[in-house]
Image (spheres, coloured by chain):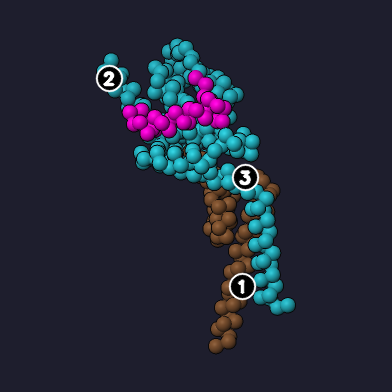
Amino acid sequence: MLPDIEKSYYKALVALQNDDYVTASGYFKNAENLVAEDDDLRILREATDLLVAVRNEIAELEKSKGNGDR
Amino acid sequence: MNRLEVLKKLETILEQFIAGVLKSETTRIAAHKSIDALDDIARDSLRGRRIHARLGNWLARSDIAHKKDRLTGADIDRIGNLFREIQSGFDPSDPEARKLDNEIRRWRESGVVPKRKLVLKMQTPVPSINTAAGFSELMKQESAYLADESERNPHLLSILDDALKSAAAKDDKMYLHLAGAIVYFLKINGYKVGPYAKRLREIEQARMGVEHVA
């Protein structure tokens, strides 16, 4: 069987294909040692994490804007 | 441009960047998905679940013979190892399992996935001067076996699989000890070794049964 770290990496890529960035970020975290060895993967992982953070920030801002409009 | 607009622009840029990376890696990702699906089948097979229909679909869909040039050597090795694990769980009396087994053998014969070499070795007598010397001799034998195996297959899981098969088939305790050592090594390094540990226990119990009868 494949090591869990490789399976996590595969599942992260599938999640990205499905635009499920939060799930992808979680799987990338599980595959941290594998990702750290490959510069391309590291950049992809960091871009994913950043996108998740940006989306969270947007959601917070929109929520506070909505509360302010009321 | 306010903060929200800047963040939305950044969101779009990141989405486009990730989509671009995925597009450039389409072939690699397709191969990974396929291997991941085969690994799921192998895991279910080791849990004793019926996997024939899924494996049949996988073999029909994957068509690795035509995609082989686009797979890395490591990917092909992974597929070969997963096939081996799946085949070890086939019931020879089941016609469907035999058909799938033949299909995998056909892939091996045509060179799509690597063939296994059967290495037969004469059992070396272990001198029983004292326990420490016997253990030291056993370690030397295992070290030589590992060096030999690693030359043709660098994957420890494949070596473990071969050691377990040899432990089941041969009257040489070295294979049993080596398999146990590899299982423990993998375990302390975070690998899930449940199915291998189970096989090892079953072999050990079968051997103990034989020894008790003798």
The chain letter under disc 3 is: B
Residue B103, given in percent of the width and then of the height, sits at 46, 31
Residue B113, given in percent of the width and then of the height, sits at 55, 30
Which residue does the numbered mark 2 point to in the structure image? B212
* Secondary structure beneath label 1: helix
Of the residues shown, which amino acid type is indicated by label 2?
His
For the residues labelled 1 and 3, say whether their Cβ atoms are less than 8 Å apart.
Answer: no
For residue B192, above or below residue B9: above
Residue at 73% in and 77% down? B1
At label 2, counting other C-alpha atoms closer than 10 Å, the crowd grade (few under 14, some 14-19, many 20 or more) is: few
The chain letter under disc 1 is: A
The picture's colour for chain A is brown
Highlighted range, magenta: B89-118
Which residue does the numbered mark 3 point to in the structure image? B28
Of the residues shown, which amino acid type is indicated by label 1?
Ile
Q: Nearer the viewer, mark 3 or mark 2?
A: 3
State the residue in front, B174 or B163.
B163
- Residue sticking out furthest to the bottom: A70
Q: Mark 3 and mark 2: span between their CA atoms?
A: 53 Å
